[in-house]
Amino acid sequence: MSSSHHRRDYRRQPSSNFTYVSPCVKYLIFILNFVFWLFGGLLIGIGLYAFVDKWQLTGWVKLENVYDVILNISLVMVIMGGVVFIVSFAGCVGALRENTCLLKFYSLCLLIFFLLEMGIAIVGFVFPHSMQSVLEENFTDKIIHTYRDDPDLQNFIDFAQQEVSNCIIWSVKDESFK
């Protein structure tokens, strides 16, 4: 027998719980996605509560076209909450279990969100006047008509206007003290 057969193989075999991922990174991704998962669930809950409340109050909810869905704050909250809930759940479980399929889905969703944001920003930067005119023509008319009929949209717009005016007032007062 040759001497190579008698030598033992002392190479270290990886244990069954061996991982290439740092535990710090793994649990940081898990915790962040867990917080977003809870936030998505909260958005879904609040949106469903507002939608059911509006349904019981008015007895009908107008959803004839895309603008009706976009201008319905409760539906937007449910849709956005659902997307955040699903994507963050995939990131949460994928990071914790080191499941490559879930992590690929999670990273693909984040890539799509990023590309959509960049696309909207580029279109807004390259065609600012046409984008502004499209938004003004389509959304302003729809918001004005819907504002009268939808108490949720009224409350949201009134709140936003109140907050913007408060910010302007505080910034003017702050400048006057300097």
Image: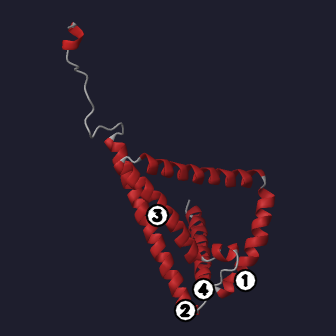
Residue on which the image places disc 3: 85
- Residue 92 got which mark? none
Write the residue at 65% across / 50% down: 118
Amino acid type at circle 1 is His
Choose mark 2 or mark 4, whichever is in front: 2
Is 84 situated left or right of 71 in this image?
Answer: left
Q: Position of residue 173 (x, y in %)?
A: 57, 67
Mark 2 vs mark 3: which is more N-terminal?
2
Amino acid type at circle 3 is Phe
In space, the residues marked 1 and 4 are separated at their CA atoms by 12 Å
Q: Position of residue 123 (x, y in %)?
A: 73, 53
Q: Nearer the viewer, residue 79 or 167?
A: 79
How dense is the environment of label 2, judged by Cα within 10 Å: few (below 14), some, or many (20 and up)? few
- Residue 151 got which mark? 4
- Residue 57 got which mark? 2
In space, the residues marked 1 and 2 are separated at their CA atoms by 19 Å
Q: Position of residue 38 (x, y in %)?
A: 40, 65
Q: Is the C-beta separation of discs 2 and 4 under 8 Å? A: yes
Choose mark 3 or mark 4, whichever is in front: 3
- Residue 145 got which mark? 1
Write the residue at 58% across / 92% down: 59
Q: Position of residue 109 (x, y in %)?
A: 54, 53
